[in-house]
Image (spheres, helix red, strand yellow):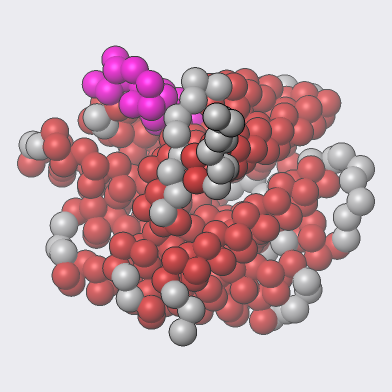
Amino acid sequence: MIPALARARLLVGLALFALLAGLWAALTRIGWEWPSFDTLVAAHGPLMIAGFFGTLVNLERAVALDRPWAYAPSALSALGALATLTGFFPAGPALITLGSLAAVGVHLWMLRRHTAMHTGAMVCAVIAWAGGNLVWLSGAAIFHAAIWWMAFLVLTIAGERLELGRVLRPSRRRRALFVAGPLVLLAGLGVTLADFDAGIRLAGVGLLALALWLFTNDVARRTVRGSGLTRYIAICLLLGYGWLAIGGVLAIGFGGVLAGLLYDAELHAVLLGFVFSMIFAHMPIILPAVMHLSVPYRSTYYLHVGLLHASLALRIAGDLLVSVPARQWGGLLNVVAILLFLGATGRQVYLANFRRPTTTAQ
């Protein structure tokens, strides 16, 4: 049997491969003429949602539980994304769907062991992921599944922030208000099966409600006054909540667009502005927990954070003003920001964990 740490590092490697392939596909989809192939372009969504996010989210749970069977969702998700990339249909979607169903089982087991609002939110998250995968596996277009996949990531992050925010001891009324956002979001997902446009608008109300709750109740509003890593994390979080609110407003305003510039704006305000802000914020915490590698903080991290948000603003402006060059350059700089983040994180991991200390001759 592969040791737990080796399993974790292998799955992180597969997740990073899926991320890089997904970013390459994104540049082609947005209009840049890069060398590519049909299955890569079509696999952009599954590579990012299942191959990268799905693998990492469930890997974090598996490491915390420290049980071999808990790694199944990550392994199936990563393998399914790779199968989709190479054109093995329906094996790819089937493996991803199996991985998400396994994730539901793992999270229900967690909920049974520790019944709490934040674990309930995480259960709802993986149920949304499995629901979207079943919609996709049924033969529906990916845009029908995308809102379910988005809900998976949003609810996962909201549950994690709720767990970390327990130190503030939110009142019963505040906890009740938190529940409203996920309930409306999940209701919107259900409505999309009958009326896609109305469902997207209702889901947008849920996204906006969650953004407002997180912005007003998250501990980041206090820790942003700190310094160093604490302040960096808080700034990433608060910027992310702003983009989540924008995504909700766009969904309410434009509804169930099926493709094109407005679809791009609705989707990536949340998946880039909110979700990647959370990745940027939490990576110095996640890597030590999952891979036993320290990631020292550096103030230069603000470079990729600033570039991500500035370039996303350019991209969304291009979408709304029907400026294809602004959208394309914004998308290219989105990818550059993520690559800078990976490079900066990799450098810090190397310096802190693998570089041999220099010795001075006597």
Q: Quadrant of residue 11?
A: bottom right
Per the rendered image, the range of residues in magenta is: 222-243
Work out whether residue 175 or residue 232 is closer to the camera in this orientation and state it: 232
Residue furthest bottom in the image: 1
- At x 81%, y 65%, the residue is 39
Residue 305, percent across and down? 55, 26
Reply above or below: 149 against 332: below
**202 with respect to 354 (left or right):** left
Q: Is residue 224 magenta?
A: yes
Query: Measuring 56% from the left and 43% from the top, which residue is drawn there?
Result: 356
Horizontal side, residue 317 vs residue 7: left or right = right
Query: How many numbered badges does the structure rendering display?
Result: 0
- Where does residue 163 sit, x and y in percent of width and height? 23, 47
The image shows residue 295 at horizontal and vertical percentages of: 46, 39
What is the quadrant of the C terminus in the image? top right
Determine whether, in the image, residue 307 is placed left or right of residue 26. Answer: left
At a point 28% along the width and 55% down the height, the residue shown is: 121
Which secondary structure dominates the residues rendered in magenta? helix
Q: Which residue is painted at 37% across and 74% down in the image?
A: 70
Residue situated furthest top in the rendering:
225
Q: Is residue 7 above or below residue 229?
A: below
Q: Nearer the viewer, residue 24 or 208?
A: 24
Percent from the top left, x then y, of residue 66? 32, 70
Q: Can I make out residue 225 in this image?
A: yes
Above or below, 291 relative to 222:
below
Residue 137 belongs to magenta span = no
Residue extending furthest toward the front: 362
Residue 189 visible in this rendered orientation of the protein: no
